[in-house]
Image (cartoon, rainbow, N blue to C red):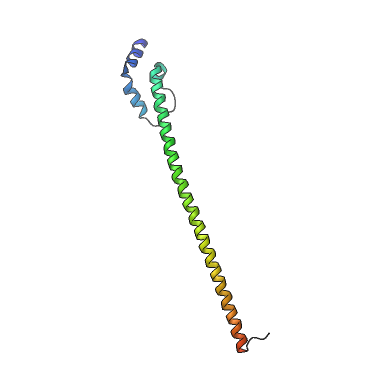
Amino acid sequence: MLRHTIKAHTQGTYQGTLNGIANKKGDFMSSPTKIEKVNLEAHVELCAERYNNLEEKLDNLETRMDKLEGHMVDIKNCLATNERVRNGQMIKFSITIIGVLATGIFAFIQAGIFIY
């Protein structure tokens, strides 16, 4: 019986079983299947599928990380630009306040209200 099973699997009839196993998401990487324990060729093909799946996931992760890095650089540049703008606004505001105070003091001196 075991020889018949191995012979049938080595002739390519296990391909449907491999496709069925490869389509299951949760059990795909967990443990060797019955067919893998019996047939080395099936094991090799399943391992190849597993590695291809891992490689695809790593490529997707790398793409997502590159996008995330790009977004972080954009945020950093935006923050730096906002900081420069804010500093410019603070300088203009400070100069305006100093100018108003100086003008007020000068006006009080001219009017004779300010005693020094």
Work out which quarter of the rendered image holds the N terminus and state it.
Answer: top left
Where residue 107 sits: x, y (%)? 59, 85
Residue 78 placed where, x, y %? 48, 56
Please name the residue shown 40% across and 20% down the image: 36
Residue 87 position within the rendered picture, expressed as x and y whole percent measured from the top left: 54, 64
Q: Is residue 75 above or below residue 54?
A: below
The answer to whether residue 71 is seen in the rendering is yes
Q: Name the residue nearer the viewer: 66 or 37.
A: 66
Residue at x-position 36% and y-position 26%: 21
Residue under the image location 33 percent in, 23 percent down = 17
72, above or below 54, in the image: below
Left or right: 115 in relation to 90: right
Which picture quadrant has residue 41?
Answer: top left
Residue drawn 52% across the image and 61% down it: 84
> Residue 112: which quarter of the image?
bottom right
Q: Please count the marks in the image.
A: 0
The answer to which image quadrant residue 42 occupies is top left
Residue farthest toward the bottom in the current orientation of the protein = 112
The answer to whether residue 27 shows anywhere in this view is: no
Which quarter of the rendering shows the C terminus?
bottom right
> In the rendering, at what x and y percent does residue 7 appear?
34, 12
